[in-house]
Image (tube, rainbow, N blue to C red):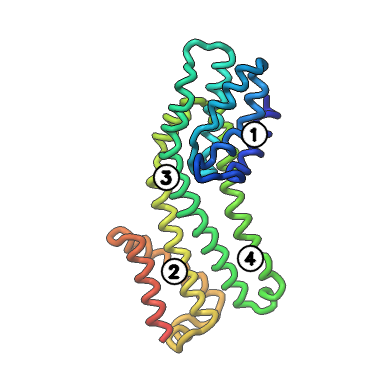
Amino acid sequence: MIKICFKMFIRTLFIQALWNYERMQNIGFLFALKPFLYKIYLNEGKRKEALLRHMGFFNTHPYMANMIIAIIASMEKRIAEDNSNEKVSEVNVVKSAMEGPLAAIGDSFFWGTLRPLAALISISMLILLKASDSWFEAYNVLIPLLFIFIYNIVHISVRFRLMFLGFILDKESIVRSSKFNFKLLWKMGYSDKLIISAAALFLYLKVFGFGSAANNIFPKTGINVVFIYGVVLVLSIFVSKKFSPIFLLYGTILTCIIMSI
């Protein structure tokens, strides 16, 4: 069974390969679930019913779909074992109920937090490398690989964990997910993006020297790089209690523009 589960996880990476306007991710969902259905349904008639059951509309965040796939697989297993407590009609109800909430969580975390954060970290490293011409020429090609590594190490780990937690906890994973403080996670992500983007802007002024004010305030020394990050971190924590991250971000950009004149 572990081999089948791992095979399902690999297939979930292609959940949007046959995305369509009519039923969105339904073919990708069935493609991921198919090995499990073939394993538990030995009767060809019941297997066909199970396959047709999952041809309906399905659409959620592709990274969060793993939890739904695992829960539905567990439900199908109980149906295949003729468990009277599990109704066939409940399968699509659970799918429909989980699609929207998990899509919102996935969009906010992966698209709105993780991807910009990985990009900002990579940009900051690129600016730091530029400060040393010898290092920049040798290692600048690694910056895109850094972005790919940061992003994928997180999202693949989350997808893998969601699938196996879905199998282990079954419907209990829905309750556990609802109790998780996602709001705190998003707030931390926004704060991190603000701090890193502000520090990257200051570093850009320091390295490329736009304007006499920037060169005078931030001379090109390695000590001041640490100083800049420290000042931005303290100010961000202090000011973020009264102002929104969006206000602070645009305020930082405006300040940097003024400094570069």
Residue to which mark 3 is pinned:
104
As helix, strand or loop, the secondary structure at mark 3 comes to: helix
Residue 91 against residue 244 in the figure, above or below:
above
Sequence-first disc among 3 and 4: 3
- Of 214 and 109, nearer the camera is 109
Separation (CA) of disc 4 from disc 1: 32 Å
Pick whichever of labels 1 and 2 is earlier in the sequence: 1
**Kind of element beneath mark 4:** helix
Q: Residue type at mark 2?
A: Ala
In this view, the residue in front, 207 or 107, is 107
What is the quadrant of the C terminus in the image?
bottom left
| Closest to the observer, 190 or 43 | 43
Give the foreground label among 3 and 4: 3
Location of mark 4 (residue): 143
Please tell me whether mark 2 sits on a helix, a strand or a loop. Answer: helix
Label 1, residues with CA under 10 Å away: few <14, some 14-19, many ≥20: many
Q: Answer left or right for 42 relative to 179.
A: right
Which of pointers 2 and 3 indicates the residue nearer the eye?
Answer: 3
Could you classify mark 2 by the number of other residues whose Cα lies within 10 Å: few (under 14), some (14-19), or many (20 or more)? many
Identify the residue at horizontal 49%, vertical 70% (top origin).
Answer: 200
Residue, disc 1: 8
Please name the amino acid that badge 4 sits on: Ile
Q: Measure the C-alpha gap from mark 3 to mark 4.
A: 30 Å
Residue that carries the numbered disc 2 in the rendered image: 198
For the residues labelled 2 and 3, say whether their Cβ atoms are less than 8 Å apart. no
